[in-house]
Structure formats: structure tokens, C-alpha cells
Image (cartoon, rainbow, N blue to C red):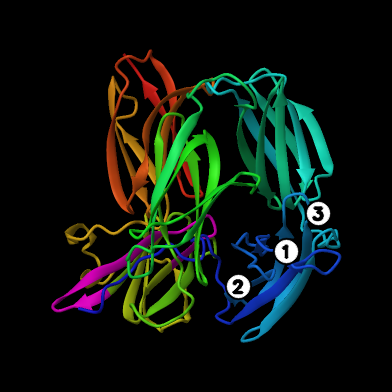
Amino acid sequence: MRGMVFLFVALLFALPVMAQEVGSISGTVSTEDGNPVAGAGVAIWDDERNHMETRTDEDGAFAFERVPAGAWNIRASMEGMEAAQDQIEVAANENTEVLLVLGDDGGGGGDDGVGSVSGTVFNQRREAVAGAAVTLMNDRREVIGETETDDEGAFSFEEVPAGGYTVLAQHGDLSALEQIRVAADQNTEVLLVLGDDGGGGGDDGVGSVSGTVFNQQREPVGGAAITLMNDRREVVVEAETDDEGAFSFEEVPAGGYTVLAQHGDLSALERIRVVGDQNTEVRLLLGGDGGGGGDQIGTVIGVVTTEDGEAAVRTIVHLWIEAQDRAVIAARGLTDERGGFAFRVAEGDYHITAELEDEGVAEDDINVAVGEITEVNLVLGEGELNPRYNSVDDQDVALPISALLLDSYPNPFNAIATVEYQLPFASNVYLSVFNTDGRLIGTLINSYQNAGEHQIEFNADSFPTGTYILLLEAGSQTQTMKLMLLK
């Protein structure tokens, strides 16, 4: 059997077909006086919402490796300073040098279209808040729009130019802040939970964070710098891992945070939510800088379409490898809204299959090379898959699907439902139950879990008949579904 296959959700999974050429980006972030800015956040994104981010080092320098050739937006930001933004062109096999000056308004960025923003404001009891003031601000903190929540705590902004924004909700002495990105012709949904900004509340709004940092060989890393940042990327507290790679933060106010681990040229980033009176566990895997060691990995990306050229959404895609006398699944994924999929797997020869009910099947043979992108186009059509690659039910290894999936049965249910979900990657997982008023009824899961299939029982014996909403959060992905309780 080929060397062990590591399955990662690569390239944010929802990638369209891309050219195989890649380049790199490097640069410096400085003030208008020419002084380097250390710790500045630098993000790049393209028109397909592919996104990467990093932070500048002590010399204000940053770099992105293996960036697909094409047009990209780049933005640098630092608390208390005006952000800098620009548009750049990445050429294949070349490095694009960028100088970003904070305080400079970055000059436009063109007309990328307009989208919309909608959301709901809740209090700490997850009750909808009517009459809350909601402000939409751009990256320079200029007010773009203002509104007020309705009786159900809802608000919306129409005709919002594509780009990065901050949404601020205020009600009395309480406020909530969220950074979002608006994409053209799409609606961005926001959930804002007002927090008490002073006095009272006891320990109900305080939790803790602990975790471990590992290298690519899954060995704990001592001496790694750990930074805990709030949603405004303000540093809340800093620490260093011990000899066993462990760290912890006590007395952390409940809310959303980003945990950044750094060790030499390697880093890892994870978004978490801290819940009052609970510990949030984090595992951070430092990313490799291209050095040797470990398995030799390549990337497979592609698109599945129907015969009439339409995107085949939620199509199951399998990668197969030959193992002695049979074919074995090396990776599997689910196509996104553009029919796209992506895998990172060990080098070698693979057979790829796609299947969608009522649309047909497709298959092909591919070769994955180290450090390169293998591009695949699959067109569904009538016929049957080769029987050798059609024995999914017989597979004895359960591999994670490359999308966050949520299901519950029976539905409607009486008292007890079984909730099943699949994680595309290991992360902190939150599974919450809300009523139709937006009130949090209970938290079923708040823990770190490995990739793969999971199951939990939801006991609603004490709940009244009605409709309930499950909210599953893992990393940056979310899924919701409605359940009907009948008694």
C-alpha cells in the first residue's frame, strides 16, 4: 500500500477550477514615517473568496507562498491605524513585492459589485433584541450605513459594495462587534450577541482556554509563542508553551477569539468561542515552510458539471488507490455550490469517481505530483461506475467528507433525536439548540473533536412541542437545520 495518506481540507475546499501556475507574494508593512509595523494583520483574497492571512514579523515583513496566479486583493491592518489595501497581479513562478503603508487609504480597489448584509442581535440569554442601533463601517471605520433592529432583532443593509466591513450593534450599555466580508451578489449573514461591558455578572461570563501546539510530525512544540486576540484582533493575553507544548489562559471573558501560535517561521491560527464557566480546548498544528520530511503531498482540485454544463452541487467525489487485490478510498469530498472540490493527498496514481443521483456518474485516472496541483474536470453522464470503484459500502475505513454536514433523525421526533454530523477537519466544535425566537435552549457540544463522523443524542423530553434550530459550528464553517418536536 502507498505511504499513509493525509487528508486535509485544502484551499478552503470551495475552490473553483484554477490554473496550475503559482507564484508568491512578499512585502513590508510600514507607517507613513517609514517605520516597520510588527504584528500587523495581512490578508489576501481573490474574486472567488479564496483567502489567506498572516502577520508581519518584527521587521514588518510578510510572505505568502504558493499563491495561484491571477488578480488578488491585499490588505494590511493594525489596531489604531488606518488600513492599507491594494490590488496586485501574481505571475506564475514569480514573486510579487508589495509595500503597504498604514494610514494610506489604499486607493480604491475598483468596483467588485455589490452584495447585502442581514443579521440578528441577541442578548446574553439569546433573546432577540429590538431597537438596537446597528452601524456598518468600512475598513477605515467610516460609517457606510446605520439602521435599527426590528421587533425580532433583525436588521439588513442592501446594495453594499463588496469588501471588508465591521458591524457594530449597540443597545443601552451593551455592544457587539463583528468583522465581515461582503461578496458581490451574495448576502452575508451576521449573528451579534451583546456583551456586558462593565460591572456585574459574576463569573457567568468568564471561561478559560487551554491547548497544545504540535509540529507536522505531531510532536508537541515547547517554547511556541501563543497570542489570544479578540474579534477586533486586539491582543488580550500572551503566553508560551511548556516543554509538553501546552498552554492555558484563565479568566477569559466569554466571546469569540483567535488563537495564534508561532514558532520560528511556522504558525497556526484557530478561531474559538469561549463559554462562561467552561474550558475551551484548542489543538494547533504548525504549518510547514516547505522543508523536507514527512509524506510527499500534492493537491487535487476540480469541478463536476452536468452534461448541460451546470454545476453539480453536493456531488460525492472519491479518490481511490490500488491496495493489493482491491481499490481503497484515499479521500472523499462533497462538491460546493460551484461544483468544486479539493484534496491534498500523497503523490501517486489515483482513480477519481463522481456520482450524483438523477445526473449520472463520471470517472477518470489521474496522477498526483509532489507540490503540484492536479486539475480535474468531471462531466456527469449516463452509465455505471467500474465495479472495482463502486464498493463504498464495503470500505472498512471511514474517511471524513470534505464539507461540514449535519443531520438528525427522526424528524419530526418525540422526545429524543439522534444528531449526526461529519467534520472535514479536527477543530473546536459547538452544537447549540435555539428556539424560533433565537433564544439559546442548550449547548450539546463544546469541545475539540477529530475529523470524521460523530453522533450525539438530543433529549428534548423537558421541551414543549414546537420547532427548534440546531446550529453546528466547526472552524469557520457552520450548518443549521430545523427539528420539529411533537408530543
**243 relative to 483, above or below:** below
Which residue sits at x=72%, y=61%? 76
Disc 3 to disc 2, C-alpha distance: 22 Å
Q: In the rendered image, is residue 243 in sight?
A: yes
Q: Amino acid at mark 1?
A: Val
The circle drawn on residue 37 is: 1
Query: Residue 122: x and y, percent?
Result: 59, 25
Query: Residue 220: x and y, percent?
Result: 34, 62
* 458 to the left or right of 186: left
Label 3 SS: loop
Tell whether label 1 touches label 3 (CB within 8 Å). Answer: no
**Callout 3 crowding tier (Cα within 10 Å): few <14, some 14–19, many ≥20:** some
The circle drawn on residue 64 is: 2
**441 relative to 29, above or below:** above
Residue occupied by mark 3? 82
Majority secondary structure of magenta residues = strand
Give the quarter of the image for residue 150. Answer: top right
**Callout 2 crowding tier (Cα within 10 Å): few <14, some 14–19, many ≥20:** some
Residue 62 falls inside the magenta stretch: no
Quadrant occupied by the C terminus? top left
Looking at the picture, tell me which residue is in the foreground, 296 or 198.
198
- Sequence-first tag of 3 and 2: 2
Disc 1 to disc 2, C-alpha distance: 17 Å
Which residue sits at x=55%, y=70%? 17
Which residue sits at x=42%, y=32%? 432
* 151 to the left or right of 455: right
Query: Residue 166: x and y, percent?
Result: 72, 43
- Sequence-first tag of 1 and 2: 1
Q: Amino acid at mark 3?
A: Glu
Single out the mark in the foreground, 3 or 2: 3
Q: Which residues are magenta?
A: 321-342
